[in-house]
Image (tube, rainbow, N blue to C red):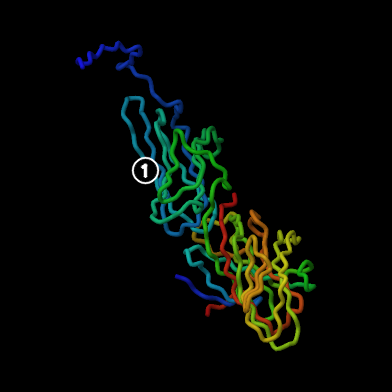
Amino acid sequence: MTARFRCVTCGGEYDDESADGVPYYHACPPEPLDAEGTRWRERPNKRDENPPRDQGPGGGRPRAEGLGRVRL
Amino acid sequence: MGAVELQPHRRLVEYAVHQVQPPSAVYVTVDDDLVLRFQDIVPSSTIRVNTRLLLPDGRVQTGVHSIATSGIRTFLTLVVDLAEGWLLSAAVELAATGIAVGRVFATLSLRVGGATGFPAQELVAGYLSSVGVLSWPHGRHDTHLAGRGAYRTVTGTDPAAGAQSSETVPTGAVWRLLAWTAVLVTDATVSNRQGALLLDDGASVFASCVQGGAQSASQTITHSYMPGGNDAIEGFRINGPIPHECLIPQGYRIRTAMDGFQAGDNWGAPLMHVEEWMHP
């Protein structure tokens, strides 16, 4: 069942599942250093929910926890 | 007309009906096994490997072996132990309805020597669907980018005010971006905001897709990008172009950049239409 979350690191809000039932993995946006966006840096405590490549089924361990998330 | 007289035809080919040799070129022993390896985005479903093996005593042994899908693109493996005999056929099927192509990529191989052995022969490789079974012999040997992918609509993250939108192609996926759209609400600060959609590989920007139109203060405008997008501006819509046939694999990003962007400007969640394949 789909749940909605807010990322504590970046404040972005998202559903954890796409409309077709496929899990959605939030990753914090980088911080741009110029208006063109070609210079940027990763956000401190970046959250990246993509699972590590070797993770088995049923796992929920994100690649980078960051500051966590709260359920809305 | 007279009656047609049929002449008896003497067959040139004769077939053995006793001591018939096995029709399969794949002789296997108990030291061999079949290995199914797959990735999928079909949650809560089952993949089956169905086998027919001709045993030395002439009996045909059938087998049905099942494994649950992961739904998260991770690699899963099912090992099917074999008896001594000749492999007559093997089929891999997805036990689900309404699943189109592009969501399960599977390979079935013959392995020699068990867990510490090596693959001796790839039997089939390709995408499964609800109506598409991979079967050997005469099966497909596709790569993960063969044919059409899965057509998906993905809603991304709704960024906090003052932040740009950014979406990362998920682990285990390759996307072809077909369309991207999001709403931008600007604050009262007088400034023209001129946007672009950037594609980067996680380190470097390799495509900067710039819109011709600009959004001013206190406006709500839908920004859209698509191949062939022609910089059209109409009322509360601004379009822009993105590359045709641009495949972006796992870890690459689709993100916005905007000249004149203010701390009170607020992007909504992007809606992306993508074609997706599995990334090995």
Horizontal and vertical percent position of residue B52? 37, 35
* In-front residue for pair B111/B168: B168
In the image: residue B237, left or right of residue A1: right
Horizontal and vertical percent position of residue A14? 56, 73
Q: Residue furthest bottom?
A: B188
Q: Which quadrant of the figure has residue A53?
A: bottom right
Residue beneath label 1, please? Answer: B64
Name the amino acid, label 1: Val
Q: Which quadrant of the figure has residue B13?
A: top left
Q: Is residue B78 above or below residue B225?
A: above
* In-front residue for pair B215/B47: B215
Q: Residue furthest front?
A: B1
Say how many tags the image has. Answer: 1
Q: Which quadrant of the figure has residue B238?
A: bottom right
In the image: residue B21, left or right of residue B220: left
> Which quadrant would the N terminus of chain B be assigned to in this image?
top left
Q: Secondary structure at mark 1?
A: strand
Q: Chain of mark 1?
A: B
* In-front residue for pair B110/B81: B110
Residue, x 52% and y 36% (percent of image)?
Answer: B122
Residue, x 79% and y 68% (percent of image)?
Answer: A39
- Crowding at label 1, few (<14), some or many (≥20) Cα neighbours within 10 Å? few
In the image: residue B37, left or right of residue B206: left
Q: Is residue A7 visible?
A: no
Horizontal and vertical percent position of residue A33? 79, 72
Residue, x 39% and y 45% (percent of image)?
Answer: B65
